[in-house]
Image (cartoon, grey):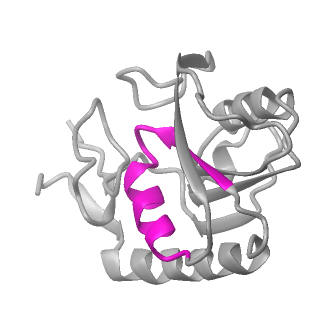
């Protein structure tokens, strides 16, 4: 591992938290056949681990949005890169996100989905950075609140690198 990458949340703690979130979701959606929508690319590992822990009928789909590009902070401009193919109307929808930072991307997506008329719409996020929030965001299922550090691993990336790290890590600033 790069010497400037330090572990913030170890894989065992992530696994225990994913299991806890899955149990809560399973209980709340027991009779609803929910549609879980993962936001690509960052949520794919989290969503994969999460759905394998849920033992009720459910469907999954993915949508791809972009707000970072190759930068370490959000541009504030949200781009819909890959449209959602699933029908949302009258469905119980749970959005699965890797990280809520400014909240702008999440706000954009939730507004987009609300317009499609779901029976219910909730949000599950593995991590959040409350200090960076620019818009109020209700997170129904939350794994971790983290400090304002640039994080990578467990699906999170920097310029498409580090997604494969099994822990959530932060990039330590290099002093000149």
Q: For this view, does 160 lie left or right of residue 38?
A: left
Q: Is residue 144 above or below residue 45?
A: below
Q: Is residue 30 above or below residue 38?
A: below
87 or 114: nearer the viewer? 87
Image quarter where the C terminus lies is: top left
- The image quarter containing residue 22 is bottom right
Image quarter where the N terminus lies is: bottom left
Q: For this view, does 22 lie left or right of residue 149?
A: right
Q: Check residue 66 for magenta coloring.
A: no
Q: For this view, does 81 lie left or right of residue 48?
A: right
Q: Check residue 40 for magenta coloring.
A: yes
Tell me residue 69's x, y (percent).
41, 20
Q: Is residue 11 above or below residue 6?
A: below
Identify the residue shown where x is 76% and y is 26%: 112
Tell me residue 115's x, y (percent).
86, 27
Identify the residue shown where x is 49% and y is 67%: 50
Q: For this view, does 6 lie left or right of residue 33?
A: left
Identify the residue shown where x is 27% and y is 33%: 160
Stretch in magenta = 35-54
Tell me residue 154's x, y (percent).
34, 57
Identify the residue shown where x is 12% and y is 55%: 3
Residue 97 visible somewhere in the drawing? no
């Amino acid at each position: 591992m790069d010497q400037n990458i330090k572990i913030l949340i170890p894989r065992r703690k992530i696994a225990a938290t994913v299991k806890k979130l899955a149990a809560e979701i399973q209980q709340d959606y027991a009779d609803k056949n929910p549609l879980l929508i993962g936001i690509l690319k960052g949520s794919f590992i989290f969503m994969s681990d999460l759905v394998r822990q849920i033992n009720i009928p459910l469907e999954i789909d993915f949508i791809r949005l972009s707000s970072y590009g190759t930068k370490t902070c959000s541009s504030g401009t949200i781009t819909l890169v890959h449209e959602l193919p699933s029908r949302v109307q009258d469905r119980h929808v749970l959005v699965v996100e890797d990280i809520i930072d400014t909240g702008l991307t999440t706000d954009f997506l939730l507004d987009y989905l609300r317009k499609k008329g779901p029976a219910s719409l909730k949000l599950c996020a593995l991590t959040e950075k409350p200090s960076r929030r620019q818009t109020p965001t209700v997170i129904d299922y939350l794994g971790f609140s983290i400090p304002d550090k640039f994080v990578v691993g467990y699906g999170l990336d920097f310029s498409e690198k580090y997604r494969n790290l099994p822990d959530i890590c932060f990039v330590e600033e290099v002093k000149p």
